Image (cartoon, rainbow, N blue to C red):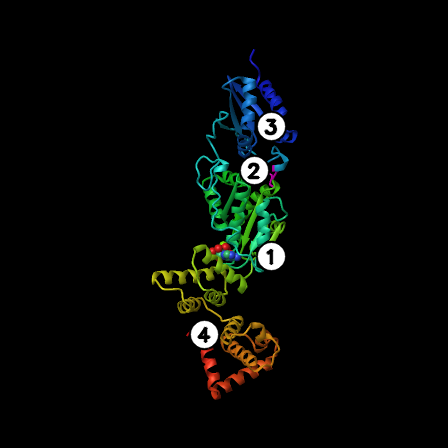
């Protein structure tokens, strides 16, 4: 007498029960419904595509063994998937989403013999045919590593939080990790570094880097192609999701909704989320409140403009990586001159290197000055007081501390007065702020310094030479 479908499935379940722990059994197997048996082909119903994929990925051999035991060699398993608009109560608690959707009972047969790979699979918006989790290309740039990301006061918190996440994705309280800061300050680099680090430490984890814009585009495409569920399921399979420049979600409600759904799913399953934004979460306009509040669940860390030391270190590292030797003076000069952001700093370095190699010229201070001049002029440059002080100190060969000290020695007073004079001439700083940065003097002292320099350059020939030389060095004439 042939067995009923119920009996067959119960036998299979008995076997499965002996081989997995209780929670796993409850979550993944007790919800499967046997539908029919035809010869040695057993059809079962599963609640979602996600569910089916999960089973395929994690329990394929167990299922095969169970079915074979009950039906004999050559047994086949066919899944019938409940078409869903959204999730509902049939989903195990760990996967439950806040939305409560209707559900169409339109079973969709996926003819899927056990042990043969998916014949129908979720459409991967990254266009990799026949999706298999491990085949998802992480879209990471392998050159963006922690090793290449110079640490400084400007990025210490963000960098170390990133490292912690890299060591233990989903295992820290930094979830989501939100990196924010102005353009060219290293958000994208750092975000990739975390992904690269995770891939190194956990090759089996699925990491995905995507810009918020690309995500939006894929979402719109999925609506157009009627494959929104595939889109959502695809993203829900990711272990570490990195979304760059989330400020571009602003004002896009539908995209925010779908991201919210994905975010919740991933977060509830202990998956890591890393976001970047060009401004702090509180300053994100046009973003749904519920999404903003999610962003605040984890850690927001900002990236600031690097200080001089960090800029020197960044240039040094780039040169070292490229195997190029440049005198330290020159490196410092570039770092002094360009203080807007790291991208511009790199841009200047690249043009200098290109110039030198095209014209087969040595990288000399002269070449660098003329290049930096062009570069900086085209990007609205402002000479800083720091820079002026450095040039003056170099010129007189005296340490910066002396310039900023209270010493009344003549040469030092002179250098200090020259720094103040040029700061007034070449920067937009107020007298008070110049005084404050030149050894904590008041505005009257700065005014006095400017007058003295003007007088001396008329009356003292040697002094005039100082002024002219410094003027040249400072304005790169
Ligand atoms: P953002 O995404 O914040 O606009 P990017 O990550 O694209 O900035 O960084 C711009 C450039 O500066 C990249 O080439 C990056 O490698 C480099 N960069 C930024 N910060 C650092 C750093 N701390 N160390 C080394 N390179 C950096
Ligand atoms: Mg970026």
Q: Position of residue 428 (x, y in %)?
A: 52, 74
Dot 4 corresponds to which residue? Answer: 473
Q: Nearer the viewer, mark 4 or mark 2?
A: 4
Q: Secondary structure at mark 4?
A: helix
Q: Quadrant of the N terminus?
A: top right
Report, in whole angstroms, how far the alpha carbon at label 3 lies from the one at label 4.
77 Å
449 relative position to 329: left or right = right
Report, in whole angstroms, how far the alpha carbon at label 3 lies from the one at label 1.
44 Å
Report, in whole angstroms, how far the alpha carbon at label 4 lies from the one at label 2.
67 Å
Q: How many marks?
A: 4
Q: Position of residue 148 (x, y in %)?
A: 50, 53
Report, in whole angstroms, how far the alpha carbon at label 3 lies from the one at label 2.
21 Å
Q: Which residues are magenta?
A: 95-100
Q: Secondary structure at mark 1?
A: helix
Per the rendering, the mark at residue 86 is 2
Give the residue furthest to the left.
Answer: 359
On screen, residue 91 above or below 160: above
Dot 3 corresponds to which residue? Answer: 29
- At x 62%, y 37%, the residue is 94
Report, in whole angstroms, how far the alpha carbon at label 2 lies from the one at label 1.
31 Å
Q: Position of residue 200 (x, y in %)?
A: 53, 43
Q: Is residue 99 magenta?
A: yes
């Amino acid at each position: 007498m042939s067995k009923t479908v119920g009996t067959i499935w119960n036998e299979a379940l008995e076997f499965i029960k002996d081989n997995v722990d209780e929670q796993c059994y409850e979550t993944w197997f007790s919800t499967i419904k046997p539908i029919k048996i035809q010869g040695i082909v057993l059809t079962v119903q599963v609640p979602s595509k996600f569910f089916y994929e999960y089973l395929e990925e994690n329990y394929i051999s167990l299922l095969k063994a169970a079915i074979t035991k009950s039906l004999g060699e050559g047994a086949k398993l066919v899944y019938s998937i409940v078409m869903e608009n959204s999730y509902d109560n049939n989903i195990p608690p760990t996967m439950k989403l806040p939305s409560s959707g209707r559900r169409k009972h339109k079973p969709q047969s996926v003819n899927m013999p056990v042990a043969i790979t998916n014949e129908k699979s979720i459409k991967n918006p990254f266009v990799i045919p026949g999706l298999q989790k491990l085949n998802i290309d992480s879209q990471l740039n392998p050159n963006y590593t922690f090793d290449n990301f110079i640490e400084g006061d400007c990025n210490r918190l963000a960098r170390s939080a990133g490292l912690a996440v890299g060591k233990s994705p989903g295992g820290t309280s930094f979830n989501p990790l939100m990196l924010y800061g102005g353009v060219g300050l290293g958000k994208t680099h750092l975000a990739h570094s975390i992904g690269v680090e995770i891939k190194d430490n956990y090759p089996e984890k699925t990491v995905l880097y995507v810009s918020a814009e690309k995500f939006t585009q894929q979402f719109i495409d999925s609506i157009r192609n009627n494959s929104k569920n595939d889109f959502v399921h695809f993203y829900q399979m990711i272990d570490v999701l990195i979304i760059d420049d989330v400020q571009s979600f602003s004002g896009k409600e539908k995209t925010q909704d779908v991201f919210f759904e994905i975010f919740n799913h991933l977060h509830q399953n202990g998956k890591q989320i890393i976001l970047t934004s060009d401004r702090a979460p509180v300053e994100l306009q046009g973003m749904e409140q519920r999404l903003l509040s999610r962003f605040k669940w984890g850690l927001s860390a900002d990236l600031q403009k690097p200080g001089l030391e960090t800029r020197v270190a960044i240039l040094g590292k780039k040169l070292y990586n490229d195997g190029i030797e440049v005198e330290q003076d020159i490196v410092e000069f570039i770092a002094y001159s360009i203080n807007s952001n790291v991208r511009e700093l790199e841009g200047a370095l690249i043009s200098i290197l290109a110039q030198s190699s095209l014209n087969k010229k040595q990288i000399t201070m002269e070449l660098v000055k003329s290049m930096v001049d062009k570069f900086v002029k085209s990007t609205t440059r402002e000479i800083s007081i720091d820079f002026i002080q450095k040039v003056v100190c170099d010129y007189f060969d005296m340490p910066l501390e002396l310039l900023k000290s209270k010493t009344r020695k003549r040469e030092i007073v002179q250098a200090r007065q020259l720094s103040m004079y040029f700061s007034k001439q070449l920067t937009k700083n107020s007298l008070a702020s110049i005084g404050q940065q030149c050894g904590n003097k008041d505005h009257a002292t700065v005014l006095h310094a400017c007058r003295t320099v003007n007088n001396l350059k008329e009356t003292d020939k040697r002094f005039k030479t100082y002024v002219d030389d410094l003027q040249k060095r400072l304005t790169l004439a």
